[in-house]
């Protein structure tokens, strides 16, 4: 089995992970660990401090004292989530973070948002292989309920992703995007 730093090096390099026996064993190990921690988070009442402690255990580093997540929350890895300060994640969110999810400061994430950082090869004989690409979310971003953010997307500072949007391309800072696939609507209104 690969050590955590070894699997993170592969995921963070953007190189395809060939799902041989060792890779499968490693991915399954960290998926089970994440399931155990998210079950602890999701199926019992916890105050905010307890939630922060559990989430810190999940991602392998301390979250800020102003971090908030409303369970349930699920991930199938957990160790490649990076959070800024004053992040709020509403209930029902699903993060597939193997490729890396980087969230800036003062970010609001609505109900049932999906962030997927893995793709698969198109060739049916190689389709089980994992192709990682990070998601990067800037500061002061608002992601509406039921949005889906796909691998390799960067969302610029101050942007808004409308509810239900499927984001397949980068979002410029201080812009509003909506739709399937998400398209530019307008600039963010400010005083």
Image (spheres, rainbow, N blue to C red):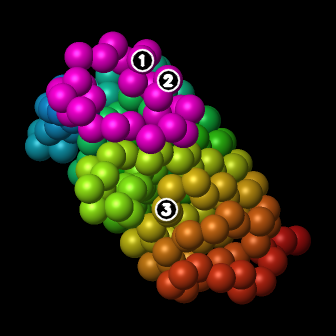
Q: Is residue 85 left or right of residue 131?
A: right
Give me the disc on residue 6.
Answer: 1
Q: Which residues are magenta?
A: 1-26
Label 3 residue SS: loop
Mark 3 vs 2, N-terminal side: 2
- Above or below, 133 relative to 158: above
Judging depth in this view, the residue of 10 and 54 nearest the camera is 10
Mark 3 burial class by Cα count in 10 Å: few <14, some 14-19, many 20+: many
Q: Given this view, does label 3 or label 2 mark the residue nearer the observer? A: 2
- Above or below, 29 relative to 135: above
Taking the spot 76% from the left edge, 72% from the top edge, the residue there is 175
For the N terminus, which image quadrant?
A: top left
Q: Mark 3 sits on what residue?
A: 150
Judging depth in this view, the residue of 180 and 92 nearest the camera is 180
Mark 2 in CB contact with mark 1 (< 8 angstroms): yes
- Would you identify the image quadrant in which residue 44 lies? top left
Mark 1 burial class by Cα count in 10 Å: few <14, some 14-19, many 20+: few
Q: Mark 2 sits on what residue?
A: 9
Taking the spot 49% from the left edge, 62% from the top edge, the residue there is 150
Q: Is residue 187 visible?
A: yes
Q: Position of residue 26 (x, y in %)?
A: 24, 25
Task: Using the numbered discs, state the Cα–Cα distance from disc 3 to disc 2 in whole angstroms.
Answer: 21 Å
């Amino acid at each position: 089995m690969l050590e955590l730093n070894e699997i993170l090096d592969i995921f963070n390099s953007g190189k395809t992970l060939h799902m041989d026996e060792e890779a499968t064993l490693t991915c399954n190990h960290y998926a089970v660990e994440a399931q155990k921690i998210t079950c602890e988070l999701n199926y019992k009442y916890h105050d905010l401090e307890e939630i922060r402690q559990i989430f810190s255990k999940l991602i392998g580093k301390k979250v800020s004292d102003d971090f908030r997540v409303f369970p349930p929350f699920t991930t199938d890895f957990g160790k490649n989530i990076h959070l800024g300060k004053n992040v709020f994640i509403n209930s029902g969110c699903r993060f597939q973070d193997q490729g890396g999810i980087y969230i800036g400061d003062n970010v609001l994430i609505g109900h049932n948002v999906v962030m997927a950082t893995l793709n698969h090869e198109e060739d049916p004989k190689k389709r089980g292989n994992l192709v990682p690409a990070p998601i990067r979310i800037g500061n002061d971003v608002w992601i509406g309920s039921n949005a889906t953010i796909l691998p390799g997307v960067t969302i610029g500072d101050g942007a808004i992703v409308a509810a239900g949007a499927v984001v397949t391309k980068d979002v410029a800072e201080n812009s509003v995007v909506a739709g399937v696939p998400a398209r530019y609507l307008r600039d963010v209104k400010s005083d």
